[in-house]
Image (spheres, rainbow, N blue to C red):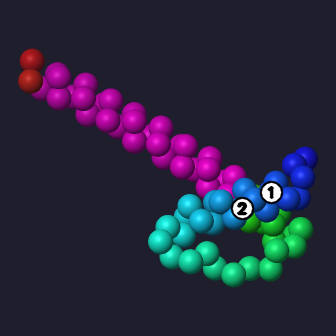
Amino acid sequence: MEPQEERETQVAAWLKKISGDHPIPQYEVNPRTTEILHHLSERNRVRDRDVYLVIEDLKQKASEYESEVFF
């Protein structure tokens, strides 16, 4: 299990990333909120990876389709 401070740092970095130019919403930093937000950040990371893989697959299929249509 990761140390609490490391999770807090990861959560803060994730919130900054998803907030973009907007300020990070205030939240109470305690073990429970950190655990919840860390879990959400991990699920978000996995979802982003899955979406990236689907996009890359669709790009490849589009490329294959274009090469079949034009030849």
> On residue 27, which mark appears?
none
SS majority, magenta: helix
Q: Do the residues labelled 2 and 1 touch (CB within 8 Å)?
A: yes
**Quadrant occupied by the C terminus:** top left
The x, y position of residue 34, in whole percent, is 81, 66
Is residue 43 on the magenta stretch? yes
> Does 10 sit left or right of 18 as displayed?
right
Q: Residue furthest left?
A: 70
Residue nearest the observer in this picture, 60 or 36: 36
The x, y position of residue 59, in whole percent, is 32, 35
Residue nearest the observer in this picture, 54 or 11: 11
Is residue 35 on the magenta stretch? no
Residue topped by disc 2: 11
Residue 18, compared with residue 42, is above or below; it is below
Q: Dividing the picture into quarters, in which one does residue 57 lie?
A: top left
> On residue 7, which mark appears?
1
Residue 27, compared with residue 5, is above or below; it is below
The structure residue drawn at horizontal position 24% and vertical position 29%, both measured from the top left corner, is: 63
Q: State the SS at label 2.
A: helix
Q: Range of the magenta residues? A: 41-69
The structure residue drawn at horizontal position 69% and vertical position 81%, both measured from the top left corner, is: 26
> Does 8 sit left or right of 67 as displayed?
right
Residue nearest the observer in this picture, 1 or 57: 1
Q: Dividing the picture into quarters, in which one does residue 62 lie?
A: top left
Q: Dividing the picture into quarters, in which one does residue 27 lie?
A: bottom right
Q: How crowded is mark 2: few (under 14 residues within 10 Å), some or many (20 or more)?
A: many
The x, y position of residue 30, in whole percent, is 87, 73
Identified by mark 1, the residue type is: Arg
